[in-house]
Amino acid sequence: MPHLNLSADEVLSTTRAVRKRLDLRRPVAREVLKECLELAIQAPTGRNRQRWDFIVVTDPEQRRALAEVYWHGPRDPLALSASHLPGANFTRARVGEHITSKTYEGLHYLLEHLHEVPALVIPCIRGRTENASILEQANTWGSILPAVWSFMLAARERGLGTAWTTLSPFCEREVAELLGIPHEEIMQAALIPVAYTIGSDFRPGPRVPLAQVVHWERW
Ligand SMILES: Cc1cc2nc3c(=O)[nH]c(=O)nc-3n(C[C@H](O)[C@H](O)[C@H](O)COP(=O)(O)O)c2cc1C
């Protein structure tokens, strides 16, 4: 499969959340998705338990059915903005309204075009965290997040764009029913749209400067 031949540092610094630059017309071969997943499952997990499963939806009818479920979920702008959550004011102060509103615009675009995205990947983790201890929560999320990020990095190297989305919690049961996921045992960690990108010139993203977030020796 063709690669962009980016350095590791380039991949790490230019893997953006791609929404408006997803090429919705170009198909993505199963082989390239498998390559990215092979790299994803090299990621670390707590006690090497590898409690992950990955659902890849490429069938157009199934994608539409899935998109329809998501459309009925996260329409509420309040839920999308998470502005009601503790820390929201802190976040706005840090990154600014401009960045957050630009993100919401992309987020709505993605939602509207979800059924057109060639591949929708739902990484899952065995075990639910609703009533779990902090330790179990940390182990669970920490055992799926590195794999998904590896998948996204591998995709970027192959000219594919992705975006981590947390649309699942709004309609997890409905998605489970549609895809036959045993909801009581399996948690949907995210929904990752995958498509070739329109152009491949992505740049490092706007971030709060390191000096403001790094704490040497103590807080
Ligand atoms: C935990 C998490 C949840 C996210 N949820 C969504 C989402 O629901 N929808 C979306 O379009 N992007 C989502 N994103 C993507 C972020 O908005 C994006 O990574 C961030 O704005 C920084 O942009 P960049 O990745 O292009 O640098 C999420 C990212 C993370 C890590």
Image (spheres, helix red, strand yellow):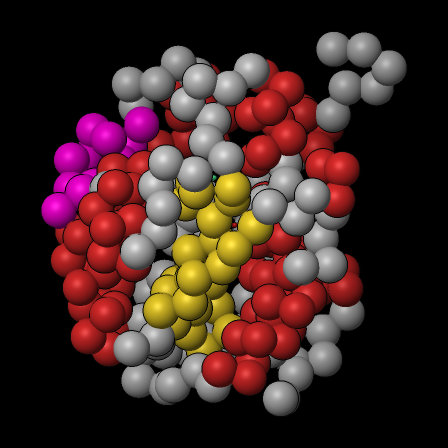
Q: Residue at x 72, y 74 (%)?
A: 6
From the viewer's side, name the closer residue of 171 and 94.
171
Which residue lies most toward the top here? 219
Q: Is residue 73 magenta?
A: yes
Residue 68 can be seen in this image: yes
Figure disc tally: 0
On the rendered image, what quadrant is the N terminus found in? bottom right
Residue 21 appears in the figure: no
Q: Is residue 105 above or below residue 56?
A: above
Residue positioned 24% across, 31% down in the render: 79
* 18 in relation to 212, above or below: below
Position above or below: 47 against 120: above
Magenta extent: 72-82
Left or right of residue 179: residue 75: left
Apparent side of residue 98 relative to residue 200 in the rendered image (left or right): left
Q: Residue at x 44, y 18 (%)?
A: 131
Is 40 part of what is drawn in magenta? no
Q: Residue at x 46, y 31 (%)?
A: 128
Residue 86 placement (x, y as % from top left): 39, 14
Q: Position of residue 212 (x, y in %)?
A: 67, 24
Frontmost residue, 104 versus 70: 70
Of the 4 image quadrants, the one containing the C terminus is: top right
Occupied quadrant, residue 142: top right
In front of the other: 181 or 114: 181
Dividing the picture into quadrants, the one containing residue 159 is bottom right
Residue 189 percent coordinates (x, y) = 45, 44
Looking at the picture, does residue 158 appear above or below residue 179?
below
